[in-house]
Image (spheres, rainbow, N blue to C red):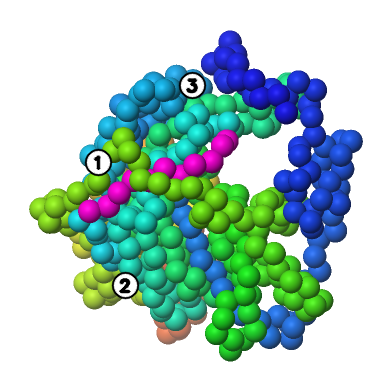
Amino acid sequence: MDCRLSLETKHWLAVSGAQCPAPDTRDLTPETRHLYNGRSGSFRDLRGIMPTATEVRAKYEAVIGLEVHVQLLTKSKIFCSCSTRFGDPPNSNVCPVCLGLPGALPVLNREAVTMAIKAATALNCAINSRSRFARKNYFYPDLPKGYQISQYDEPLSQDGWIEIEVNGVRKRVGITRVHLEEDAGKSLHEGFPDSECNSYIDLNRSGVPLVEIVSEPDLRTPEEAYDYLTRLKSLLLYLEVSNCNMEEGSLRCDANVSVRAVGALAFGTKTEVKNLNSFRFLQKALQYEIERQIEILEGGGTIHQETRLWDSREQRTYGMRSKEFAHDYRYFPEPDLLPLVITEEWKEEVRRTLPELPQSREGRFLGQYGLPKQDATLLVMSRTMADYFEEVASLSGEPKLSANWILNDLIFLLQENKKGFVEYPVPAKNLAELIGLITKGTISGKIAKDLLGEMVRTERSASEVIAEKGLEQINDPGKIADLARQIIAANPKQAEQYRKGRTATMGWFVGQVMKATRGQANPQLVQEVLKRELS
Ligand SMILES: [Zn+2]
């Protein structure tokens, strides 16, 4: 394969294959080699695997561990001062260090280390006072140095845990290690007119700081894996060390999966599933991979240790390459960087900046505000939402109502109007004002819902919308009396019933007046006026 690197006019680096040569089929696993269609350069369409029968499935247990890569929110890269900004023109945030030019030397970004310590501390890991960077050697066009600076036998931290909860059952999942490394560039194989022949490379991402968070193989179901990733993401967002945006690739997840007979102690052979760039894909890919492995074992076959790719279009995993082992990477200590020394003072300094974390906040919401468990769990998932809730609750003095209005109405209205959580279009004081109007009986719940919709759309306060839309309450006794008389005159039968002592008819009359005023009449006043007019 002709791998000339050339600089294209639009700043893209193109790796071209002169005549679109087919991939080396030696790279394909035995399982996929016969499926490869050499002429069109694609894989043949494959039949999906049939769902495994429940009784067969029940004989097996899955063992899952996740490796999560998270981009840290530093302004500059880990070993140079280039910007980490996402979406800049391709190959514009690069320098000799992140381009891997000979003689360029890395300088460690202190902020990246601080953020990694923060994540490791929140994950209950032991932080090593001395750790070391190592070179992980492999060739890939988006890795210009020919090696990635990572950590190997002396990582930043290890032996932590995170608590998950599925169907009301709590469980601790071990964190094997949290270490620092640099990201590689990005290869783009699709979306260009000549994508058939060329791949493009953007090195803006080369050298962006990452933490790799490796879990113990403690997860047993796709649901547990989903919950683990959800809680991990929530935690990292609380810590403000990453934006965890899966679409932009700032949170990436690979899964190690194996199955074994229920009750067996030894692990089965695992496969690594890559390309899980959404929570939904993670769950689907795990379900698929577990069933695939069970089917092979049930058929008397063996599982090969390999790396597999999730194809979201075909809803299946493909064998990509036989899994490399650590020794394939020829790790050795990075000679251009000193060992990383983290003092007790530094650890303490980071510990002091830790915010209240989701789990303890959930407990506090239950006790302090008397919220139902489900509401508390949902609210603390996002720090922004939890902060917002606390502000509305304190301004309105109505924590339960605040939680209800946020979770039942506001989040759906925001979605409907394609507005995000972060740039809240309804300030806390405005929602508190609306809740106050409801509790004082100034507006009905129905009107409040309409009002909130208008507040989200127009980003104005309840009182502003009320004034503009003429939704103010009708407090004029004369006006209400006129209306009451008309309604009584039109319904002599009901009026007669009331006078004969069927006081329940009062509710019906109040309803009629409220309907005629589109809910704007002051209900208390309506009652008083009706009583007078009917007697
Ligand atoms: Zn650079």
Q: Is residue 135 magenta?
A: yes
State whether residue 21 is above or below residue 395: above
Q: Disc 2 marks which amino acid?
A: Leu
In the rendering, which numbered label is found on residue 338? 1
- Name the residue rendered at 61%, 67% in the picture: 270
Q: Find the distance from the CA under tag 1 to the CA under tag 2.
A: 51 Å
Q: Magenta span: helix, strand or loop, mainly?
A: strand
- Work out whether residue 119 can be spotted: no
Extreme top residue here?
9
- Work out whether residue 173 can be spotted: yes
The crowd level at tag 3 (other Cα within 10 Å; few <14, some 14-19, many 20+) is many
Secondary structure at badge 1 equals loop
- Name the residue rendered at 82%, 50% in the picture: 33
Q: Disc 1 marks which amino acid?
A: Leu
Extreme right residue here?
39
Q: Is residue 101 left or right of residue 309?
A: left
Residue range corresponding to the magenta coloring: 130-140
* The CB of the residue at mark 1 lies under 8 Å from ligand 1: no
Q: Nearer the viewer, residue 163 or 410?
A: 163
* The CB of the residue at mark 2 lies under 8 Å from ligand 1: no
Residue 524 at x, y percent in the picture: 31, 65
Residue for badge 3: 91
| Mark in the foreground, 1 or 3 | 1
